[in-house]
Amino acid sequence: MLARRRNAVYVARNKDTDTVAQGLSTLDSWMNGIRRQLDAVLEAFFEAKCEEAARLSPRAIELVVEVQNLTMRGGKRLRPIVTAAAHRAASHDGEPSATVEVGAALELLQTYLLIHDDWMDQDRERRGGPAVHYAFQCKHGAQHLGASLGILAGDLASTFSWELLLRGQFPPGRRDDGLTLFVEMQKEVFAGQQLDLMTDADVERMHDLKTGSYTTRGPAELGGILAGADAASMDALRRWSAPLGVAFQLRDDLLGTFGSVQEIGKPGDDLRHGKHNAVVAAFRRLEPSAAARAALEAVWGRADASDHALQAAWDVLSEAKTEVEARLALLADEARDAVTASPFDDDAKQMLEEVTLRLTERGS
């Protein structure tokens, strides 16, 4: 129901469904072009890093290979796409190739954060393969050594992200802006991760810090900096990307709680892992009955919870789901309103609206 309503809003703004379909098709082609450029840069980068590691020690290649495996295994490259879209909006006719090194840096930053996040959450799988620390544990047959090597691999991915960022094609006088922003993004992620680990009640604030900072806000501002954007354009990019980041994570929470096998691989994954996401937070705010709480506890943090128990949990979470969907819709509309009010040209506005749709409607 939510997807249909939000699509209806989008269709109304674009006059007819043919326009929407054409826009999404064009966006797909544009996004695929960015992914191809980005993967080519990453593949060449990792080839060079393996050669460098081999000169240090044959064993040093192991860390690089695990970072490479996770980075190149899946991933939608959404952050570089946000950067390229923001660059296009702020530069009017800028080529995506001008953002590719910074986009690659964002992918390595995500790899770093995912490696450490999986270790903290004791998750064994990521993107259809083993989490990095778990891959090391299996290879060496030692839990502590595997965890230690995983942490080192995450640290290496962080260093790689900085190396790629320093190759970025920043305009004269704007490199320091980009470097400073990259620092601020990471400080916000760390604060958000702390809130997540401590099950802080302000889930939306946690989402803005942990996800929005390096998924939409930071990448959008980096795109503006790469384009040499003026103050008005930078402000417009912030107004667009701030609500978009939280909406993106709310969609992720809905998928993690209610998503199908096709969408996320295992239904109710967030519940079975005991994750404190927006759906669970909304459920607890609604002061549920003892029976409803018991239905949730039957699957909460229980990897072996039955499908029957999961369905019972879904039933008691329905009101919370509706609340999260409504909040997501409001945030997505806020992002679209920011695009409408922006100083960008019509083609750029259409692209930003389409990116908004893609980030907030995935899996619907």
Image (cartoon, rainbow, N blue to C red):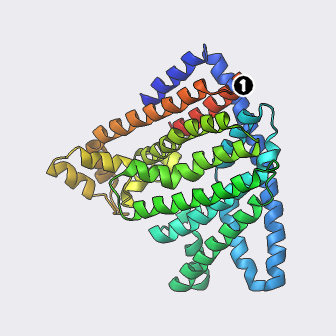
> Does dot 1 land on a helix, a strand or a loop?
helix
Location of residue 181 with respect to 345 vertically, above or below: below
Q: Is residue 186 visible?
A: yes
Q: Nearer the viewer, residue 67 or 311?
A: 67
* Residue indicated by mark 1: 347
Say which quadrant the N terminus sits in: top left
Q: Nearer the viewer, residue 255 or 169?
A: 169
Relative horizontal placement of residue 360, taking residue 48 as reference (left or right): left
Residue under the image location 48 percent in, 67 percent down: 123
Q: Quadrant of residue 57?
A: bottom right
Judge the density around disc 1: few (<14), some (14-19), many (≥20) Cα neighbours within 10 Å: some
Image coords of residue 72 (percent x, y):
70, 59
Residue under the image location 61 percent in, 14 percent down: 16
Image coords of residue 108 (percent x, y):
68, 61
Image coords of residue 83 (percent x, y):
69, 44
Q: Quadrant of residue 175?
A: bottom right
